[in-house]
Amino acid sequence: MKYAFFPGCVSKGACPELYQSVMQVYPKLGIELAEMTTASCTGAGVLQEKDLRLGDALNARTFAMAEQQGLPIMTICSTCQGVMSQANHRLTTQPHYLQEINGLLREEGLTYRGTTTIKHFLWILLEDVGEEALRQQITRPLSGLRAAPFYGCYIQRPTNALEFDRHPDRGKSLERIIEILGAEVVDFPGKTRCCGFPILTINEKNSLTMVATHTRDAKSHGADIMVTPCPLCHLNLDGMQTKAASQEQTSIDLPILHLPQLLGLAIGLETKSLGLQRNLISPESALAKIGGAG
Amino acid sequence: MHTTLRIRRFNPEHDHPSSYYQEYDLEIDPSDSVLDGLIKIRETIDDSLTLRCSCRGAICGSCGMRINGHATLACKTKMISVASEGGTIQVEPMNNMPVIKDLVTDMAPFWSKIRQIQPWLQPEGRPPTAEYTASPESMSHLSGVMSCIMCGVCVSDCTVLDVDKTFVGPAALAKAYRFVADPRDSATSQRLNFLNQPNGMWDCTRCMECIQVCPKGVGPMDRIMALRAKGLAEKVPATCGSRHAEVFSDIIKHKGILDEPMLAIRTFGLKNIGRLLGMIPMVVQSVLKGKVPLSGPLHRPIPGIHHIQQLFKQVRIKR
C-alpha cells in the first residue's frame, strides 16, 4: 500500500502535531508514503472563490504528478480531500475541460489523464488497511473513553464528488474507527456540521458560536474527547475553544484530537510522540481513563 | 413495506404548547413517497396531522421538511430510500424558521430575505416596446439557478442561519446571483455592494449543506462563490471577506503553500488592528505549546514555485 502523500499546508503549519502523529502511525499499518514536496496548496475553497479554473489547474498538477508515479494520493485533511475530490470530479466528468486544463500544465511537461485516486487517511484505514489488520495493531484498546466524532464539511458533502454512492460507509467512517479502537462513540447532532473556521476572520462571533455549540453539545452528550480528521476544524475547535467559551460565558474544556493521535494511542504510542502536548486543550485528564497513555 | 413514521408535532392552540414526537405505524408501498405516507396518516389514522403540500411532483416547493435529519421535499423522497423494512423514519418541520403547526413552517422570514435582494430585473434606458430580450446563449448558464422553486430547504439546513438569523441566506443569495449574472440587468454594482455588507455573501461558511440538500440542483453555495468572484472582479470595497480571498490567492502564488500568520495579518490589516490583537492570546499559547510550523516560521516557498507562478500567469492571460 504505497501512496503519494499530500500533507496539506496546515499539517506543515499551524498543526505540526498532525504531521508528527501521522508519521508515527503509518509505518505500523503496512503503509508506504512518498511525500509530494512540490505539490501546491489545494486552494482550500478560498482561492476557488477568486478563480475556480486556477484552483482546478493547481489540483490537476498535483494529480498529474501522482499519476506519473502510478500512486494514489493520501490526504490527512478533510478540506484538502474535499477540494481535491471536487476538482477531480469536474476534471474527469468533462473531457473538454480536462483538455483545457492540460493545456495549462503543458509548460511543465505534465498531463493529467484522469486516473488518480484521492483518499483521506480515514478512508484508507477502513478501505485499504482493513478492519482486521487495524485490530491486530491495537495494543491499548481505548475502553472507557467516550469519543465524539467531528468530520469537517468537505469530507461529508457533496456526496457525489466524494463517491459515497460507491462507498456508502464513508459517511459513518469516523464512528466505525472509534468503535474499532475500543472507544465509545458519542453521537451528537453537530458531528457533520460546520466548525466555523472558514469565517473566523470574517465573522468571528458566528464562528465562535459554532465552536461553542458543537463542543458544548458533544460534552453534554457525555464526550471525554472529540476526534477529527480535519486540521482546519482542529484549529477552530481546539485553538479557539477558550475564546468561544468566553464569548458564551461558559466553560467547555473538551480536548480535540487529530484522528492519527487517537489511533496512535490505541496502537500503544506515547502521548509525546503523538504531539498531544501541543493540543491547546490538554487531553491529560481525559486520557487518564485509558491509564494516562504514557 | 412496514414502517414507523416518527413525527414532530406542535399545536400552538394547546394551553402550554411544546413540541413532542408521535409515532405512527404504516403499511405502505416502498415506492410511495414520504408525502404519500403522511397523507395516508392524515386520511386514515389522525386527521389532526398538519402539513403543507400541493403538486406532489417537486414543482411547487410546498412540502419542504426534514426527513431523518436533513431537509428535503417529502414528495420527492421515496420511502425505500430513507428506511428499510420495519425501520423508522423521522419527520420534522424545517429548521431556521418558526413552526406554525406540526410540519408547517412560517415562510415569512424566508420571503423577507428574498425581498432584500430586490428579485426583479433592473434594466437601464427606455423600456422596449415588447419584452426585455436576451439571447439563449447569454442566459443558458442561468438555467440551473432559475430552477429554484423557493422551497426553503437550503435555508432550513444552513449552518450560518443556525447561529445568526440575520444572515441573508443561501436562497436569497442564489436569487441575487440570478440577477447579477443576467446580461439585461444594470444594477450589478449596487447589488454587489449590498451583498458585500455584513450578513451578506462573505458570511457563508462554504459548508455545502445547501448544495447537498437542494432538491432542484440549484447549488446555492456555488452561486455564492460566483457572487464573490464577481465582487472581486468588480472591486467591491475591501472587507475582511474579500481581503481573505485576495491575500490567500497571493500567498499561494508566491509560496505555493499557505502562510497562516501572514494570511491573518494581511486580511485584518491596520484597519482591524483590534481583531489582530485579539488573536494574540491564542498565538502565544500555540507558541508555548510548540506549535511552530514545520515549514519554518517564515514559510519558505515550495520547490518549483516558478511552475505555480507560471500557472497563475497563464490563467490570467486566458481570462
Image: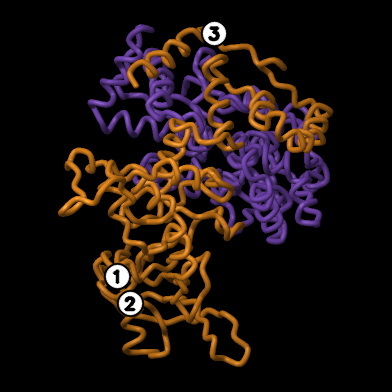
- Residue drawn at the location 17% of the way across and 42% of the way down: B136
Q: Amino acid at mark 1?
A: Ser
Q: Measuring from the top left, give residue B212's x and y in whole percent.
A: 40, 51
The picture's colour for chain A is purple
- Comparing labels 2 and 3, the label whose residue is closer to the camera: 3
Q: Are marks 1 and 2 in contact (CB under 8 Å)?
A: yes
> Is B274 on the left-hand or right-hand side of A124?
right
Q: Identify the residue under disc 1.
A: B33
Coordinates of residue B72 in the picture (x, y in percent): 38, 62
Residue B124 relative to residue B254: left or right: left
* Residue B252 seen in render: yes
Residue B303 badge: 3
Q: Sequence-wise, which precedes: disc 3 or disc 1?
A: 1
Q: Amino acid at mark 2?
A: Gly
The answer to whether the residues at label 2 and label 3 have Cβ atoms under 8 Å apart is: no
Name chain B's colour.
orange
Q: Quadrant of the N terminus of chain B?
A: bottom left
- Compute the Cα span from label 3 to label 1: 56 Å
| Marks 1/2: CA–CA distance | 7 Å
Identify the amino acid type marked 3: Pro
Residue B292 vs B40, above or below: the answer is above
The residue labelled by disc 2 is B37
Residue B119: quadrant of the picture: bottom left
Question: What kind of element bears circle 1?
Answer: loop
Task: Locate residue B168, reporting x and y percent.
Answer: 51, 55
Pointers 3 and 1 in contact (C-beta within 8 Å): no
